[in-house]
Amino acid sequence: MFGPVSHRSSTFAALALGVLVTGLAVCMVLPSSGPSLTPILRETTPATGFADGKSHKGGGSCTGGGTVTPTTSSNWGGYAVETCLNSPASGVVSDVKGTWTEPSVTCTAGETAYSSFWVGIDGYSSGTVEQTGTDSDCHSGTPTYYAWYEMYPKSSVNIALTILPGDTISAEVHYQGSGNFVLTLTDVTSGQTFQTTKMLKHADRSSAEWIDEAPSGGGILPLADFGTVHFSNCAVTLNGVSGSIVGSAWQTAQITMSSSGTVKATTSAVTSPYTAFSATWVSS
């Protein structure tokens, strides 16, 4: 079995410098579907490996909104938005939402690997994150599906919903004010809904994301073969302006998951009205 696993991202500034911060949050995760399995320890570690050489925090100039910039990460795929990717404003993101179809994971005999799908505020160029999502994992060759949320630097928390492949999952993170965030995750197919309000006083609120991720635990863990995951209904509110993945009031990063030149998952382009995209597994 692998060591502690993280479902979350973190500051890109540390990433560009090759800094890895580990062991900040640990919790027990119990799968909410499938056979009874040994609980897995999960800890928070930052994402790694951006190829553009930029700090993703501070400096640089903003050339206006509506742009899409390709980049790569060792354990992130999907999209992120900020007022400006090189010098993002803080305290501006108040809502992010999205829908995805829980992919069916393909597991080889004895394989242990992980894949996470989530929406969230923060983490692209900040040290705070507020997110909720699901996993399609392989545990000793057994497909396992479950839901969770996290308010970094606090521990991630497993959600007691039964998640099955093919289910339509809808998630939203909403900033309520005074440091309070409302996190909602709904299994539209089964009708199950989870909602909680959590406080994170020092949240940066500088970015919003729709992400497929290879979680970490003493390093990036193998990415489970999730096939293709389809995100839709992607929406964000930034500086009081509501829109989709691409908008004139913000800049967008299109993230391909790649490590040492090996692509792990691709991210499709978005076309008008910029509310949907797909991510496809390539390698572990």
Image (cartoon, helix red, strand yellow):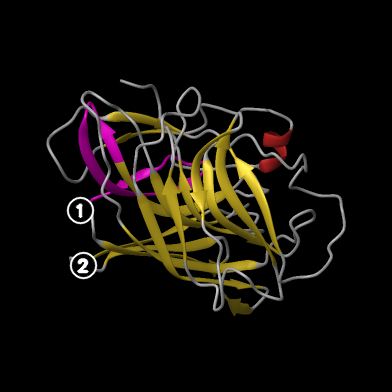
The Cα atoms of the two marked residues, 1 and 2, are separated by: 9 Å
Specify the quadrant of the image occupied by residue 111.
top left
Residue at the image position 65 percent from the left and 42 percent from the top = 11
The quadrant the C terminus occupies is: top left
| Residue plotted at (51% across, 62% down) | 180
- Percent from the top left, x then y, of residue 20? 62, 27
Q: Is residue 193 above or below residue 240?
A: above
Left or right of 209, for residue 12: right
Is residue 89 or residue 196 the one in the foreground?
89
Q: Secondary structure at mark 1?
A: loop
Q: Position of residue 264 (x, y in %)?
A: 49, 38
| Mark earlier in primary sequence (1, 2) | 1
Magenta-tinted stretch: 137-164
Q: Please give left or right for residue 206 compared with residue 145 in the image.
A: right
Badge number at residue 150: none
Judge the density around disc 2: few (<14), some (14-19), many (≥20) Cα neighbours within 10 Å. some
| Image-quadrant location for residue 4 | top left
Q: Amino acid at mark 1?
A: Leu
| Residue 46 falls left or right of residue 35 | right
Image position, residue 261 (x, y; %)? 61, 32
- Asked whether the beta carbons under mark 1 and mark 2 sit within 8 Å of each other, the answer is yes
Q: Position of residue 230 (x, y in %)?
A: 39, 61
Left or right: 14 with respect to 34? right
Residue nearest the viewer, comparing 160 with 68: 68
Identify the main secondary structure in magenta. Answer: strand
Name the residue type under label 2: Thr
Dot 2: element: loop
Q: Residue at x 13, y 34 (%)?
A: 36
Of the 4 image quadrants, the one containing the N terminus is top left
Identify residue for label 2.
Answer: 189
Residue that numbered label 1 is attached to = 164
Q: Residue at x 50, y 24 (%)?
A: 219
